[in-house]
Image (cartoon, helix red, strand yellow):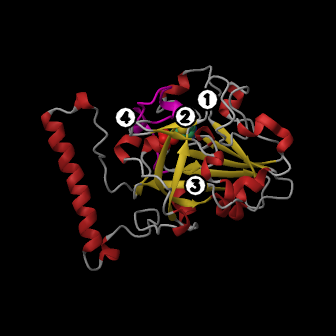
Amino acid sequence: MHYIRRPSWHLSESAATPESVFMNRRAFLAGAVGAAALAAAPGAAEARPAEIPWTPEAPRNPAYADAGRPVTRERVNAAYNNFYEFGSHKKIASAAQALKSDPWTVEIDGLCAHPQRIGFEDLVKKMPVEERVYRHRCVEAWSMVVPWIGFPLAELVKLAEPTSDAKFVRFETAADRDAMPGLRQRWYPWPYTEGVTIEEAMNPLPFMVTGAYGKTLHKQFGAPMRLHLPWKFGFKSLKSITRISFTADRPVGFWEELQASEYGFWANVNPEVPHPRWSQARERVLGTDEKIPTQLFNGYGEEVAHLYKGKEDLGRALWM
Ligand SMILES: Nc1nc2c(c(=O)[nH]1)N[C@H]1C(S)=C(S)[C@@H](COP(=O)(O)O)O[C@H]1N2
Ligand SMILES: [Mo]
């Protein structure tokens, strides 16, 4: 499934003995050259493993071709991650390689006409896969720009056909005690869950991510499938999704359960509403020394501001 099996960033600096550097480089080059040769050769379509629609051919959606800022370098982004299942710090990339992401089954359940257990690859085959370059703003005041591959969440919602009683979509991350050492930290409310309203889920922006940087999703990014809600703080965009449920009641997410006064349900990005412990006015751009102003709705207001008309009485809660 991964045509580059050993990404070059995988080895930590201390592990990079001359031999392993050589082996690693060789594996990387073999992967890169192999992929290039396949793409260039006549009959490449036959030579490629058939029907892997989330591989690099995914067409870039012109509406999201340019995020207005440079794409964050892959090696930077792939070495700085939030994935608490693998540890409550940023260097979880090597621990995350223990995640068993293939085969993968997703449970779609709750208030919908077509509840189902579906294999990840079968699900993706039914979906219009494309590439979108999105800005991501973490609540910790850093940001990145990523060329994701995936499909609109709205298409998955249509597949499930929620009933009129369904008002929310709840997502759940895998909780594998053997692979995920973070689960031993029992004070966290595992499994990691998050939720959005049906209206938010049907908006064109929410993206079910199955790849990034022209590849299948690195494990530390939340393989094989994670969510990205680019106008909300990053903690809403949960990883390695195993269950999607349609509910009448508002789901309470992992961070809200842990600390509702700091991490709420809506979590829309707003530079003017500070986190209780720090300002949200600016953001550190991952991989640079820059600090830039944060934008309302992370710059996606044109697409999503209408979702919150009439909800102004929620006040501060809309923004945290
Ligand atoms: N399951 C799960 N999903 C998660 C998290 C997590 O700890 N566990 N962290 C979130 C946070 S706070 C952020 S900022 C993004 C980070 O995504 P990245 O590591 O791909 O940059 O993932 C989000 N999704
Ligand atoms: Mo985050």
Q: Mark 3 or mark 2: which is in front?
A: 2
Instruction: Name the kind of residue labelled 1 in the image.
Output: Ser
> Pointer 1: what residue?
279
Q: For marks 3 and 1, give the CA distance.
A: 30 Å
Instruction: Name the kind of residue labelled 3 in the image.
Output: Met
Residue 217 picture location, percent across and down: 44, 51
> Pointer 3: what residue?
208
Residue drawn 36% across the image and 54% down it: 2
C-beta proximity under 8 Å, tags 1 and 4: no
Q: Secondary structure at mark 1?
A: loop
Q: Secondary structure at mark 2?
A: loop
Q: Is residue 112 above or below residue 219?
A: below
In the rendered structure, the answer to whether residue 128 lies left or right of residue 76 reads right
Q: Mark 3 or mark 1: which is in front?
A: 1
C-beta proximity under 8 Å, tags 1 and 2: yes
> Pointer 4: what residue?
94
Q: Assess mark 3: CB under 8 A from ligand 1?
A: no
- Is residue 97 part of the magenta span, yes or no? yes
- Dot 2, how many residues are within 10 Å of its Cα: few (below 14), some (14-19), or many (20+)? many
If the image is split into quadrants, where does the N terminus sit?
A: bottom left
Q: For marks 2 and 4, give the CA distance.
A: 24 Å
* Mark linked to residue 196: none
* Residue stretch rendered in magenta on the structure: 81-103
Instruction: Name the kind of residue labelled 2 in the image.
Output: Ala
Q: For marks 1 and 4, give the CA distance.
A: 31 Å
Q: Quadrant of ligand 1?
A: top right
Q: Is residue 277 above or below residue 158?
A: above
Q: For marks 4 and 3, give the CA distance.
A: 24 Å
- Is residue 179 part of the magenta span, yes or no? no
